[in-house]
Amino acid sequence: MTQLKAFIFDVDGTLAETEKDGHRISFNRAFAEADLNWNWSENLYGELLEVSGGKERIRYYLQQYHPEIRENLGTLIPQLHQAKTIHYRQLLSSGEIQLRHGVKRLIEEAYNEGIRLAIATTSALPNALALLEKHLNPNWFEVIAAGDIVPNKKPSPDIYNYVLEKMNLSPDECLVFEDSFHGLQAAYQANLKTIITVHNYTKQQDFSSANLVLNHLGEPHNPFTVIKGEIQDQDYFDLELAKFLIK
Ligand code: XBP
Ligand code: MG
């Protein structure tokens, strides 16, 4: 029987719904500040989420929607992204973005029971830290793998392989929490079992290789809905369910 040793969490979309009301708003604020009349609507942002990473997303947007802008991209993109990061951190510190249902409860339970914790995110490190500092304790996470720390972003498995190596763990001892197809692909290619909690931007995606798909992690008085997976008599995701899934 395999022993559960660690949880690895994605950040954006998994710990909190940061994309629509967080990252998107911050990109738009950075564009306005730079006197650019680009506006990423909720719909357009859904399309742009196909590209992981903020800098990569701006570059893709320019290629698709402003192919005439070709000069100084090597300066413009990092400048915009840096400004966006400042806006994003301000927005998070204001407390406007809350954790998703069950996240804090599960992480506290895992930490108190000695389950090792890690973060694997495409977001820049300051952005991931801003959310952890506001709502959780960054010191609880043994490894916080973020942004450009690996050569290739999700759906590449690089970030998950990096975490496994740093923690000296084998994939069968861990469970991953993700919200998106890209995230699932990354974890799956690293041979990790994955629990998906969907949201509006990802609920139509293909999660056939996930071990469990939920609408959220649930709370004792706010049960989850199982979208895919065989579990019995469970209203919320806890360590007991995690141990059952890892067997
Ligand atoms: C997160 C992302 C990130 C954020 C922007 O993906 O795609 O690009 O939208 O972050 P995941 P930065 O949840 O799969 O890690 O601007 O900090 O790059
Ligand atoms: Mg995500």
Image (cartoon, rainbow, N blue to C red):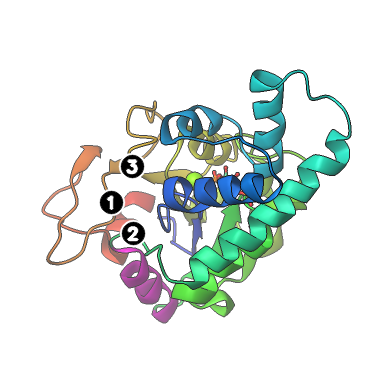
Q: Do the residues labelled 3 and 2 touch (CB within 8 Å)?
A: no
Q: Which amino acid does label 1 sit on?
A: His
Q: How many numbered circles does the render carry?
A: 3
Q: Vertically, is 237 above or below 228? A: below
Residue bearing mark 2: 100
Q: What stretch is highlighted in magenta?
A: 102-112
Which residue matches tag 1?
216
Residue 199 is labelled as 3
Q: Give the CA separation, mark 1 to mark 3.
A: 8 Å
Give the image quarter of residue 194: top left
Q: Is residue 103 magenta?
A: yes
Residue type at tag 2: Arg
State which quadrant residue 48 falls in.
top right
Q: Which mark is residue 54?
A: none
Disc 2 Cβ-to-ligand 2 distance below 8 Å: no
Q: How far across and down, in percent of the image, does residue 30 sit?
A: 64, 50
Is residue 25 shown left or right of residue 153?
A: left
Circles 2 and 1, Cβ within 8 Å, touching? The answer is yes
x, y percentage for residue 237? 27, 59
Q: Which of marks 1 and 3 is nearer the N terminus?
A: 3
